[in-house]
Image (cartoon, grey):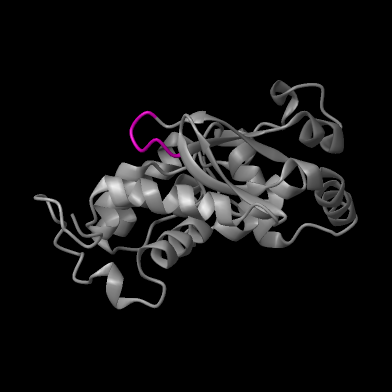
Amino acid sequence: MSQSSAPDTRPEYVDFDVQDFPGGLAACLEAILVATDRPLTAEDFSRVLAVDPEPVNAALESLAESYSDRGFELRRTARGWQLTSRAAYQPVVAAFVKDGQTARLSQAALEALAIVAYRQPMTRAQVGQIRGVNSDGVIRALLVRGLVREEGLDEQTHAALLVTTDLFLEQMGLQSLEDLPSLAPFLPDEDSALAQARQELSGQPQSPDPAQGSPQGEEQ
């Protein structure tokens, strides 16, 4: 059976043949492996590329062998295939991570870290939904710095769940997550929230309630 033989359930969005790309199936697999942030099975690749699982598995095995003299490897685990740093280069990676600790976190990274801290466990996609922008880059920075880590999988999407680490607690001067400052003082009370919702729905200006005061500084 040819590598580009499409399964019976060919997705509508697959309007290409892998052999039309330079490097064929192997190069397509590499492109996906570099872009993904989680292990993928042969079935995952097969579905996305509309190629039978058998040639996908063969191509992945061949790629893994071809990386034998690289600083990274294509590793097959119970969860699937993923590109990772080779264990022998751990001192090199550790030096990079420690060097990164001296740089200050960007505003975007601080936002993502705060979201994970208060809403954990959660996926990258959920962090991005709250921030309203793709957060994969800042999440990678937080992972490299050791402030967050992956722990378990989301039951619905099977995406990796993010949680904060002991290093995060140490840097924040906290004994546990229970010591995180409460967000209650920064949130509107129920009556103010309902009044705001009615105002937005009606398009009418809201009369200030002397008992509640003017809601100010809700978003920092």
Instruction: Indicate the position of residue 75 as horizontal and vertical percent values.
Output: 56, 42
Residue 104 image point, x, y percent? 83, 58
Relative to 183, 194 lies left or right: left
Please name the residue shown 22% across and 63% down the image. Answer: 4
Residue under the point 47% across and 29% down: 78
Horizontal and vertical percent for residue 91? 87, 45
| Residue range corresponding to the magenta coloring | 155-159
Which one is nearer the viewer's eye here, 156 or 53?
53
**Where is the N terminus found, in terms of image quarters?**
bottom left
Residue at 77 percent of width and 36 percent of height: 168
Res 116 quadrant in image: top right
Residue situated in front as seen by the camera: 167 or 67:
67
Please state which of residues 23 and 127 is positioned toward the viewer in this rendering: 23
Is most of the magenta stretch helix, strand or loop? loop
Left or right: residue 130 versus residue 114 is left
Residue shown at 25% from the left, 51% from the top: 47
**19 up-or-down from 123: above or below:** below
